[in-house]
Image (tube, grey):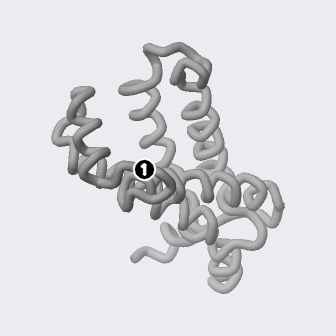
Amino acid sequence: MNSNLLNRLLSTNSSLTGLALRIPTGIIFAAHGAQKLFGAFGGYGLEGTGQWMASIGLEPGYLLALGAGSAEFFGGIALLLGLLTRPAAVVLAFTMLVAIFSVHISNGLFMSNNGYEFGLALFSISVALAFNGAGAISIDRRMSTLSE
């Protein structure tokens, strides 16, 4: 892989802001992904999530459940570790856009009506991490300083 591209993907600052965003967001995404993939935390697993996705017109439901669940679970783990944070954050931001516009937008803003406010918050955090990187105390930071 081109080392210049890798350096750009890993580049970050020494601020603790990325850490403060990554940890809670990584936990949330990993937990939601585990619900979709494994049925953990009261989730429906791939089969149930796939059936639900198909019922709202997202076809093929099983494959989209696998994609969304994988993006959330593995993206969340990547955020927790601060590993390839920028690409993980871009994938998670896209996943949130799909969720907002395919499921929540018609319900308005508020979560109490299954609205898009939570998805919007996760989207915004993901975009911020995509722009700023992982910050201090991350594998990205460590790898970027090693390659200098």
Residue 102 image offset from top left, x and y in percent: 36, 26
Q: Secondary structure at mark 1?
A: loop
Q: Residue at x 53, y 56 (%)?
A: 31
Residue indicated by mark 1: 43
Vertical position of residue 15 compared to residue 124: above or below: below
Amino acid type for the residue under numbered disc 1: Gly
Q: Residue furthest bottom?
A: 146
In this view, the residue in front, 147 or 60, is 60
Please give the count of numbered marks on the rendered protein: 1
Q: Residues within 10 Å of mark 1 (few under 14, many from 20)?
A: some
| Residue in the foreground of this view, choosing between 5 and 42 | 42
- Residue 59, percent from left and from top: 18, 37
Q: Looking at the image, which residue is at 21% across and 48% down?
A: 62
Left/right of residue 24 with respect to residue 55 in the rendered view: right
Q: Quadrant of residue 11?
A: bottom right
- At which x and y percent is residue 52? 28, 36
**Does residue 28 appear anywhere in the picture?**
yes
Q: Is residue 87 left or right of residue 36?
A: right
Q: In this orientation, does residue 9 appear?
A: no
